[in-house]
Amino acid sequence: MLVAAVVLAAPATAVPSDLADDRLPWGETPPAKLARNAEPNQVPHDPILIDGDANFTAANGVTRGSGTASDPYVVEGWSVASGTEAAIYVRNTRAHFEVRNVSIAGAYNAVRLENITNGRVDESVLVDVGYGFDIRDSAGPITLDGNQIQARFEGVRISHVQAANVSRNNLSALLAIIVEWSNATLVEANSFESGVADAISVSESEDARIVANNVSAVEEGISLVRAHRARIEANILIANGMGMFVRDSRAVVVRGNTISASPPSDYRGDGLRFLDSPDAVITENVVTSNSAEGILLRASPGANVHANVVTGNGREGILLDHSDGASLANNTVSHNGWGIHSAASRNATLTGNLFVNNGILLDGDLIEHYSTHVIAEDNSVEGLPIYYDPHCGNLQIDRVALGQLLLVNCDSLEVRNVTLSRTDVGIEAMQAGRVTVQDTKFQDLAIGALVRNVQAFEFRNNTVLRSGPAGLLVSGGSWANVTGNTVDGCVPVAYDQCDGVDIQGVAEVVVADNSIHGNRDGLSVADARSVTVLRNNISGNGLGGVIGLSGNVRLEGNVLENTIGYIVSQAANVSIRGNRVRGQGGVGLEIYLVTNLTMEGNAILEAGSTTGRPGIYAEVTNATIRRNSVSSSPEGLQLYNSRNVLVEENDFVGDQGGAFFLGLTNVTFARNSVTSSAGYAICSVSVGLSVYHNNLRSTVPTCFGATTGVTWDAGYPDGGNYWSLYTGSDNCSGPAQDVCPDPDGIGDMPFPVKGTDVDRYPLMMARPDTAAPTVYLAHPYADEMFESPNILASGIALDTGGSGLARVEVRLNGGPWLVASGGSSWSRALTLDRQVNLVEARAWDISGNPSEVQAATAHIPLPNTAPAAAFTTTPTQGGLTTIFSFDASTSTDRDDPTSALL
């Protein structure tokens, strides 16, 4: 029976009333229906409605058949027009039928099958339709095979259907294949064209099989939600926003798929993601080159992950996140951001996994996240075994070939003379009494050493090369000593983090005599009761580092030459002395929210020269900033929101300005030398500031108008400041400069700073350089041990009095003073000539002022020499029966005390 005439066009807003439901979630208006054009060898036909078996008639397009399994009704060879409800609508049938070789163009709904069994649609073409196939409320079997489907919204929707088969179709639709509330569905060997958002979605269904489909360049390749016991096998998923997503689904099997090249996207770029889906089996898949995780299991316990090849993924190859009881065996995991990462998961079993440039990372909040696993030694990193001990007790490892070392609950651990390379974490130690790592090489790792909750940790004389996001990462514990290491060249992986040394939450921290180079952040320390950072060379990093949320901080004698110098933030009782700082891309020293600060004797060069930032930026309370040298920076000093600060005897040289003040209380700026080649000497937007006895050389005196609460002199007769711009004369004296003629070195007229601000007693001459220069002896430090007598004494020196540094001198064991090479960074070769040596250093400025002498002892083990025997005999002569007594108490030995002689 024909139900409608041919409709050539319909208004764009004409939506069939029974489809005005939630299937247009984007609020789009269906496009106008297109005129039908018959395919070659096809005959135009009006819309077809078959309601019940009795309506399988020739008028409804049936060309042959009797409705049995061996002789089904066939609807074939038609180009079918759009209908009110669908171009082809079959409902309430039980007979066997097949629709084949038909075409539908421009229909809003192309084919609807409802409450049917034993139906097929094969080798048909649906072009520019709104919805392709809508199959619902049917017992099946129902098959869609070999069709071409081009739909604007949905290609195939199967809802409340048993035993549907969707195979060998080619689809282009926003949502290509949707299966919901349907069991035993087979989706096999389909391919998908451009313009697809989600290729295959299965929800609220059981026992689905998704096999051998080819999906590329869509947002989600395969998506399962509450799809229990599904099997996903032999599919090829390439360059999708997410390859495969499984949520709230039990006992899903994923076998033999290729999942690769998921790019960064709102869907994260994972290859395979399981969420809240227990008892998964993931086996024999190739998961490669996805931008995020390769395989992610979150809150999905009991997974079996076996015999997969997981390589080249941007984040983890395999991530277990809150997923207990996983079994991971015989996987090949290589060249991912991380290899296998167990995060907050318990009771994992890892056997026979092969890692190349990857390894195992254990993570979590509870000790059970580290100690409950079984990690066999047949797991290997490039042929070397992974050693895991969840209860290691007292352990010594020396000169052992290892791929990776994972240790938990050690009473005492010593690792010496080991080489670890091309894995995720060289050494991971969790919850231990004492850990010592010494003379060990870490190379091409994600993290060289990862140490958590170790009470006493020592990291000494190690080399860490090309490791990132951190060369050394320490968190928790009572004490950490990081001394004499080289940490060079962090290589960032998937995270925006790359630290040479990162120490968090350790009570007492000592970092001394290290070379930290080529990282994003050199040295970062946070949440410590005591921090001592001495004599390190932290250079060539993006940021020298940060010390934050800590007390009792000593940052002394370091070379800090980085894009941005160094930051100390939210700290108390801070001493910053004798550092050489360079930071062309930012602030030299940034001191933020610090209480009780002493900053003295630092040389800061070229800070902010490319970014306009100052040499020193400070927001402090109770601070002394003394005898620092800042040169070749846009501004020497910026002091903000600070109180009770003394800034004295510094040398500030800025291209744009000398010193900038804002929001101050009780701040004194005195006896400084300020030079600005193209700007102001002092810029004050402040109250509570006293400025006197400074040498101020600039093109303008200050930057803004008059301020309230700033005094520009110390009264009479102490005087004010020397201003290079002052052109007045000195003929008189007295508080009112009215005792004439009686010159007193103070200008007779006040110097107009700006607006109503004046220096009442400007100095006629620059303050002479009577300040002693500063010298800092970095090496040797007190009681430093050397293996060779040939050493290089070195340190920094500076002069802030204005005349400039003349020279640095060094002497050994009270001998003659020898001139060192260099200036602010100086050195002198010495040859030690005894076991305990005294090395001294001093500096001179051009005005002839000497510094205080700095001294340190240097020790060298000399070759062990024979003792010098000296003894007497009593009596001196006798016969055969004479008893002689020998006294050797005057014998000596250069190496040992007399009491040690036998």
Image: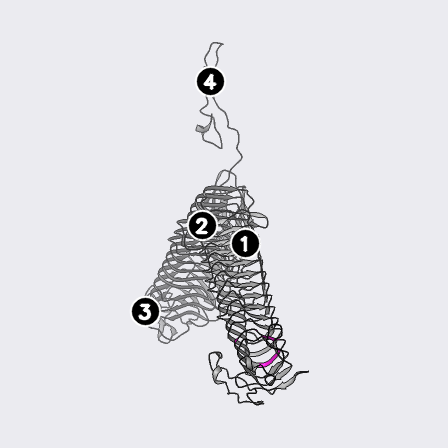
Q: Can the viewer see residue 96?
A: yes
Under mark 3, the amino acid is: Val
Which marked residue is nearer to the observer: mark 4 or mark 2?
A: 2
**Residue 257: quarter of image:** bottom right
Q: Is residue 705 left or right of residue 406?
A: left
Report if residue 150 lies within the magenta region. Answer: no
Does the CB distance between marks 3 and 2 fall below 8 Å? Answer: no
Instruction: Mark 1 or mark 2: name the one nearer the start of the chain.
Output: 2
Which marked residue is nearer to the observer: mark 4 or mark 3?
A: 4
Can you tell which mark lies on residue 372? Answer: 2
Q: How far is mark 1 from mark 2, CA to CA?
A: 25 Å
Instruction: Mark 4 or mark 3: name the one nearer the start of the chain.
Output: 3
Can you tell which mark lies on residue 739? Answer: 3
Characterize the local packing of mark 1: few (<14), some (14-19) or many (20 or more) Cα atoms within 10 angstroms.
Answer: many
Residue occupied by mark 4 = 873
Under mark 1, the amino acid is: Leu
Does the CB distance between marks 4 and 2 fall below 8 Å? Answer: no
Q: Nearer the viewer, residue 644 or 807?
A: 644
Does the CB distance between marks 1 and 2 fall below 8 Å? Answer: no
Residue occupied by mark 1 = 445
Note whether 664 is above or below 34 in the view shown.
above
Instruction: Mark 4 or mark 2: name the one nearer the start of the chain.
Output: 2
Characterize the local packing of mark 4: few (<14), some (14-19) or many (20 or more) Cα atoms within 10 angstroms.
Answer: few
Q: Residue furthest right?
A: 41
- At numbered mark 4, what does the secondary structure look like: helix, strand or loop? strand
Instruction: Mark 1 or mark 4: name the one nearer the start of the chain.
Output: 1
Under mark 2, the amino acid is: Thr
- At numbered mark 1, what does the secondary structure look like: helix, strand or loop? loop
Q: How far is mark 4 from mark 2, CA to CA?
A: 73 Å
Q: How far is mark 3 from mark 1, CA to CA?
A: 78 Å
Which marked residue is nearer to the observer: mark 1 or mark 2?
A: 2
Q: Nearer the viewer, residue 817 or 623?
A: 623
